[in-house]
Image (cartoon, helix red, strand yellow):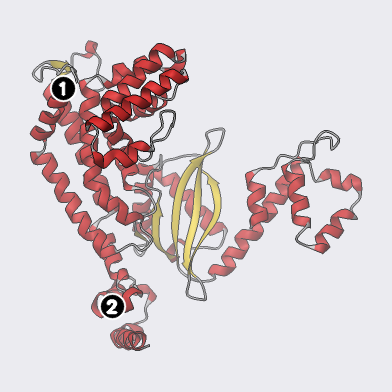
Amino acid sequence: MHFFGLCKISLKARYTDPSYTWDKGHFLEMIDWYKGFDENVRRAFDEMDPDRCSELASRGFQKDLVKSCTEEVIQAILEEIGDSRFSILIDDTHDISSKEHMGIILRFVNKQGKVIERFLDLEWVKDTTPTAIKGNLVGFLVRHGLSISRIRGQGYHGQSNMRVEFNNVQRQIHDECPYAFYVHCFACQLEQILVSVSSSSSSAISYFFYNVPIIVNATSAPCTAKDAEKCRQAILDKLDSGEISKRDKSTLKETKWGETKWGSHHTTLNRIDTMWDTVLEVLVIVDEHGSRGSRASFSIETMESFEFVFILKMMLKLFVIIKELSLVLQRKDQDSIQAVGLLVVVNERLKTLRDNGWEALFEDVKRFCDANEIPVPNMDEHIPSMCHSHLGGVTVSQLHYYRAQIFFAAIDSIRTEINHRFNDGSMDLLVRLSCLDPRRNFSQFDVEKIAKLVDLYSEDFPEADRAIINDQLEAYICYKTCL
């Protein structure tokens, strides 16, 4: 597997004169590495004709070798799966030529009763329509002797560029195989999904998140040591005066102007909000003394706009609402029942924010803008509607723009995405499966809930087994708790 992985990572085998360097190239170095693991392999390579050895560096040979390794690894995985049922995990990626590929991972229970995940392959996706993606997936499974009828679960990457297409793919697969239940991939940070979905709902939000890394990077533009000291002193003065709260001191002390990554989206926006004056002071210094390509002046202009402040404050509220749920979903010891409870809370808080949160948010933004001398637009003024030019004549009021096209649009899209990813059917399935959790001496074990799984997967349980499932479960839990 490690050998196959190295082949996939790099196949450079350019000739290098050993009199100039010890590096033979990645491919030949890998051959030497592999020879050290097996005496028979080492002897075979050492006894090989020199002309034959030179063929190892050829592109054709390397392609054949990688193909053979791929086939051998896939065959080993298929033998490990046997005739078991399995779940599919799908992600998309693109290569250096921007061609879309679909990564296929299978999850199954092996003969020892352990849950196993195996990466199978990358499948080139010529057409990214849902029907074409499903066709590629089914075709791949059929080529390797796997039937779509054996799928018992499906999951897709939460931040995928093909998120909408994957949503349709999972529906099509479920229509064909009703036991292929969709379950959210808990590995993804929920805040990343929030950023992706809200950005898709409004070009203004998308532009906001386009500008945030520019602002962060602009603070790291080259400037003199004296100017860097001014930046550091400005932060210390605000800490001493209390303008920056004690709660943020431990975080801010670790912040260095020059870092291009400040942590999560929530952390980054919180720092911009908390250290507003200091960030602007740094940008002014960089603009005056830094490199011409720093874009600091652009960042200053961007920050000192009502739209930037409005979206900043709105996103901070949204991040706070989903934070606890995001943390629970990333924990290794995920508690499905707790996650379901938090989902209800998140949905209710989002609904409350949409119905009753506009006035409070708008007043908060106005106070901030007044304190920082940022002009507040007249909400009755008419401007071109989003995605329309002045020439089109389609206008809306500033109030409609900020409340309907940004505030409502963001919240509605987030609620829709959450309800899709965590629909009642999927969460009910997770709650029932969580009853099998062996932690705390099977404290969540519930015979009735587990027995209902038999109805969900009726094809996998003969009638005779279904009749005695309750007795078997009770005997099992009695045995496990008495050990």
Which residue is labeled 2 in the image?
A: 451
On screen, residue 118 above or below 448: above
- Distance from disc 1 to disc 2, alpha carbons, whole Å, reads 61 Å
Rendered location of residue 381, percent (x, y): 11, 16
Residue 422's disc is none
Residue at 32% from the left image edge and 20% from the top image edge: 281
Q: Residue 371: which numbered mark, if any?
A: 1
Vertical placement of 265 versus 336: above or below?
A: above
Determine contact: label 1, label 2, CB under 8 Å: no
Quadrant of residue 359 within the rendered picture: top left
Determine the secondary structure under disc 2.
Answer: helix
User: Split into 4 quadrants, where in the image is the N terminus?
Assistant: bottom right
- Give me the residue at 39% from left, 11% from top: 288
Q: Which amino acid does label 2 sit on?
A: Ala
Q: Which of the two residues, 438 or 402, is positioned nearer the viewer here?
A: 438
Q: Which of marks 1 and 2 is in front?
A: 1
Q: State the image coordinates of residue 42 (x, y, percent, origin top left).
A: 83, 58
Residue at figure coordinates x 47%, y 17% from the top left: 224
Residue type marked 1: Ala
Within 10 Å of disc 2 (Cα), the crowding (few <14, some 14-19, many 20+) is some
- Give whichever of 43, 432 is nearer the camera: 43
Dividing the picture into quadrants, the one containing residue 387 is top left
Compared with 122, 289 (above or below) is above
Residue 453: x and y, percent?
A: 30, 73
Q: Would you say 260 lies left or right of 437 here?
A: right
Where's the C terminus, which quadrant? bottom left
Secondary structure of the residue carrying tag 1 is: helix
Determine the residue positioned at 55% across, 56% down. Answer: 120
Q: How crowded is mark 1: few (under 14 residues within 10 Å), some or many (20 or more)?
A: few
Query: Can you tell which quarter of the image residue 290 is in?
Result: top left
